[in-house]
Image (tube, helix red, strand yellow):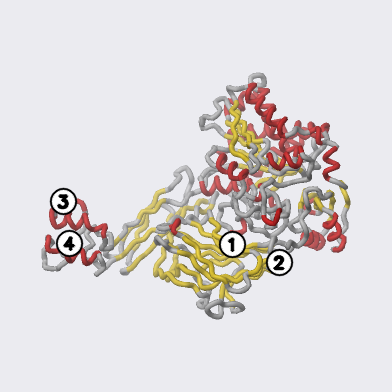
Amino acid sequence: MWEHAAATADEVRSLIRVQADDDLSRGIVRQAVSDWDVAAVGDSGRSLDLVVTASDVERLIASGISFDVLVDDMVRAADGVRASYHTLAQYETLIAGLAASQPTITQLTSIGQTYEGRDIWCLEISDNPGVDESEPGVVFMGLHHAREWPSLEAALDVATRLVNGYGSDPEITALVNGQRIWVLPCVNPDGYVYSHDQGHDWRKNRSPQLYGEFGVDINRNYGGSYDGFVTGEWGSVTQMATSHNPGFDTYCGAAPFSELETQAIRDFMEPLDVSIAISYHTFSRLVLWPWGYSTSATPDDVLMSAIGTGIANAISQHGGDGTYNPQQSHDLYATTGGFNDWFYGYRYYESGRNVLPYTIELCSEFQPSQYQLQRVLNANWEGALYALNQAANVQSQLMPWVSPPVLTVPPTDLDGNFTISWQPQNPGASSSMCFIREYAGLSVITDDAEAGGGAWTLLDMSVGSDLGHSGTHSIGSSLLGPGISGMTSAPLQLAGGDELTFWAWYDITRGNDAAFVEVTANGRTFDILEQFTGSSGGWVQRTYDLSAYAGQWIQVRFRNTASLSTSGSQFYVDDIYPVASWGSISTLAVVTSGTSYDVTGRSPGDYYYQVRGWDSIQGSSGYGELQRVRVLDGWPLGDCDCDGSADVFDIDAFVLAITEPATYAVAYPGCDVMQADCDQDGTADVFDIDAFVAIIAGQ
């Protein structure tokens, strides 16, 4: 079923190094080893350290790729140092002992349990643990990947030094008193028991998967980058290091946050006030920061790279574990679904708070000897101290994202001249200008692609006549090599009971590639309705209940993703309903001062407005939700509350108009009591009741 068989738990695995000294050879190597278990990338991408089986070696030899064997048998090599690392039970005893030794500055909490029922422990270290005192927060995490044992030891070592040094070491005491520090040394305890305690070479967690496989790479299972780019979403795959194959070590799971471990971390981390987060891994001697999915820089890249470089220098200057190189994560290789991209993106775009997350790749091997391990811990303690000392200054140096301003518009207007206004959501963010966008001429259609793809924003997807369901055309992509394509609809407000329906045709390499249909209500967080892989065998219809989004403005997105080793990922859609087809979408103005804008000269009809903020440092906020203005040629008869519609919401106003007209005039300024003259006899009175009922009943 898969392109090449995944290794079994007990199959002998070796660590090899492949040299690729030029762009051509690097391309050949990466094509051959796409979705393989990449342990490290060195020498500016000129070498790859790979964990391989005997069948993998045969494939490399057949591809004409030479390599050096670094470790013949990963498990046998680990056996020689296994006793130098704590068992899970020993670790749990140690962390509980730390909490008990200094109860006034510690709080030990299980943030959740794994598939096999083990606790994920977090030790908070602060002078008032559990209390939000608006202090800077720092997080240390270890062991996302089961065989990366030093990552558990490094996080545990940080906790041990902080707790034991409190009260005797002035620097440590000041750091603990002035910050909230959370340490999660082992976020994958099931995997650790299977790898360390039970003696298997293993990377993932241990949840059961399809086809008898086990485990998800939990550092590929977090959500997307939250910046709205299709390439940053969970499950988007263009290079190595992320896979949709349940048998591969980099399997990203069935959906974002499908795993109990990532769910627990998400739920724990989202509300915290964190300035710096460090996640330990092995190996490569690197300090990495977002983005991992793209070469583009984050809005906070200047400070993030400066502090990342400082952490790397602090570790390197200690001299115990060699030189650590600071770099953006994508420079190592592209990944999606990682902790760093998700945590940075979520904090920045969704919650309006900044955080600087880092991955530290420890050591020059997976599991160094006890002697070398201590050198690793000593050196990385210096990096942790540097981060802790920087955390207090981070928030003062960062500018939060300009959240979409809150827009206010008149619901109705009689002459086509009106004012829209807005207020910032997060006044602490600087906004040097605002953009006003107007939508008009809405039609809700079934898009059969015959008129082109004008209702969609297309990324490497196109309208073509190769395939068609109801006619000769459809919209889609054919990825014969690595790539990501997508198409996103214009915004549409859903009514209760709306369903999304379309026809799809796909032929997708099973286990390597996938396509998705997704929906978003904010332009950043996309909910996956279905994932497609394999072959549809022809056109198939899909229907989805969208009642959960009733009343919201939503956008639908189709996404197709293919890996380096794909043999083809073809995905086409047709006859899509409901689709918003707008007669015009235009930017009315760029406002550089003030918080309002006068719209003039609009003829009767419905107009919709959005506003987004922008500043020179953080860029654009993205547009907020659309707000409607209905321009009328006079109020409809029976529209007693003057909202532009005669409906059941006018009943109270109608009763007031015919019984207490003076009170009505005060309660509904600008409305005429004659709106209640539904029988049009020149008087608003009780004789209008039958006519009013007929109007709101639609007769």
- Give residue 439's position: percent from left, percent from top: 41, 65
* Alpha-carbon span between mark 3 and mark 1: 56 Å
Residue at figure coordinates x 45%, y 57% from the top left? 435
> Which badge, 3 or 1, is on the more N-terminal residue?
1
User: Residue 303: x percent and y percent?
Assistant: 62, 43
Mark 3 vs mark 2: which is more N-terminal?
2
Q: Residue 663 carries which label?
A: 3
- Name which residue type carries label 4: Ala
Image point 14% across, 55% down: which residue? 661
Instruction: Using a 10 Å C-alpha cutoff, classify the residue at mark 3 as few (fewer than 14 neighbours), some (14 to 19) or many (20 or more).
Output: few
For label 1, count other residues whose C-alpha is less than 10 Å away and answer few (under 14), some (14-19) or many (20+). Answer: many
Q: Nearer the viewer, residue 4 or 290?
A: 4
Location of the N terminus by quadrant is bottom right
Which residue is under mark 1? 516
The residue tagged 4 is 676
Residue 534 lies in quadrant:
bottom right
Looking at marks 2 and 4 on the same chain, the residue that comes earlier in the sequence is marked by: 2
Q: Which residue lies furthest to the top in this view?
A: 168
Seen in the picture, residue 508 relative to 249 is either above or below; the reply is below
Residue 145 or residue 623, whichever sits in front? 145
Q: Position of residue 553 (x, y in %)?
A: 44, 59
Q: Identify the secondary structure beneath mark 1.
A: strand
Label 3 close to label 2 by CB (< 8 Å)? no
Q: Name the residue under label 2.
A: 481
Work out whether residue 386 or residue 252 is closer to the camera in this orientation and state it: 252
**Of the residues under marks 1 and 2, which one precedes in the sequence?**
2
Amino acid of disc 2: Gly
Name the quadrant of the C terminus.
Answer: bottom left
Which numbered disc covers residue 492? none
